[in-house]
Image: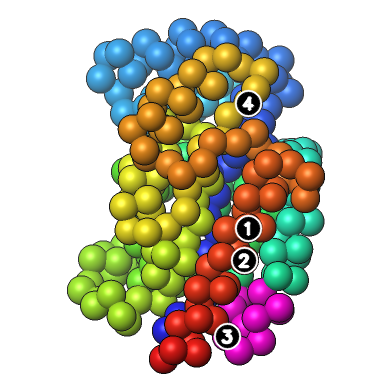
Amino acid sequence: MSHVIALVFDFDDTLTPDSTTQLLVHHGIDPEDFWGNKVAKRVLAGWDPTLAFLEEIFVLTKPGNPLEGLSNAALFEFGKTLKFYPGLPDIFEELRAITREYPLTLPTIEVYVISGGFEQLIRGSTIAPFLTDCWGVSCVELEDTHTIARPSRIVDFTAKTRFLFEINKGVGKDGRSNPFLVNEYLSPDKRRVPFSNIVYCGDGLTDVPSFSVVQARGGTTFALFDPARPSGVKRAWEKFLLPKRVSNMCFPRYTADDELGVLLRMAVRSICSQLETSAKIG
Ligand SMILES: [Mg+2]
């Protein structure tokens, strides 16, 4: 019986306001034009959304453009400036404190981020030391200028589920050099983190496959939405809650006084007590 609980988060608009948009704004680029015009046109023309946004970023890194010379190190540095939603990262330690109330099983909590944004922004951010692992878009640089030039990994909405299964099966770091490892058969009783021990939080349509995978396998899911953006509220309600793709809908606020903060603490407590009950019976 596994006593590992995995908290899995999307990054942008789940833990922090959209990090790529913050990067654009910092460099004086109009995010409305970037996402609503340039990227949207590529997607309409048949581009994969992740490759569409990356291509537009690469255009901006050319000489004379606002992101000229953007390197992985610069992304990492900018990551340090990201501000997280209230209650972060304190909630992680508070959730670990809850597990200590269950001495029979002493569950461990692992925290993961699966993002369609830049992995270097996550790795540079102040939340990185609290993460067990994270996956996001990675790029290789030009040898001479170190400007990011090509993707070495993209994370689109279905790829997010690959990393959920890596967590579920306990693939660990080996998944980076062997992406096919996750497809090896492993019977449910041998999986390191059963889906019933997984809690997934995300805010967007890119989280739909992840919501479905976790929800259908007995995990807990939270759709987050910004109350200040009516379109996000409507989307969360119509696309996530009505079709029962998620168990809960909350604002991305994590303190012990916020609904999400309370429910996450409750979700961890509930998993802990189920593990304890199973251990007593078993
Ligand atoms: Mg998001």
Q: Which residue is mark 3?
A: 105
Residue 122: mark in rendering = none
> Gap in Å between the C-alphas at discs 1 and 4?
22 Å
Q: Amino acid at mark 3?
A: Thr
Chain-order first, disc 3 or disc 2: 3
Residue 226: mark in rendering = 4
Q: Are marks 2 and 1 in contact (CB under 8 Å)?
A: yes
Chain-order first, disc 2 or disc 4: 4
Chain-order first, disc 3 or disc 4: 3
Chain-order first, disc 3 or disc 1: 3
Residue 112 x, y percent position in the rendering: 55, 58
Residue 266: mark in rendering = 1
Q: Which residue is mark 2?
A: 269
Q: Is residue 77 above or below residue 203?
A: below
Q: Amino acid at mark 4?
A: Asp
Q: Amino acid at mark 1?
A: Met
Q: Nearer the viewer, residue 77 or 43?
A: 43
Residue 268 is at least partly visible in this image? yes
Q: Residue sitting at 49 percent across and 18 percent down?
A: 234
**Is 252 positioned to the left or the right of 156 in the image?**
right
Stretch in magenta: 99-108
Residue 72 shown in magenta: no
Element assignment for label 2: helix
Main SS of the magenta segment? Answer: loop
Residue 198 x, y percent position in the rendering: 47, 61
Element assignment for label 3: loop
Q: Amino acid at mark 2?
A: Arg
Residue 279 x, y percent position in the rendering: 48, 87
Dot 1: few (<14), some (14–19), or many (≥20) neighbours within 10 Å? some
Q: Nearer the viewer, residue 89 or 154?
A: 89
Q: Is residue 153 above or below residue 232?
A: below
Q: Nearer the viewer, residue 64 or 66?
A: 66
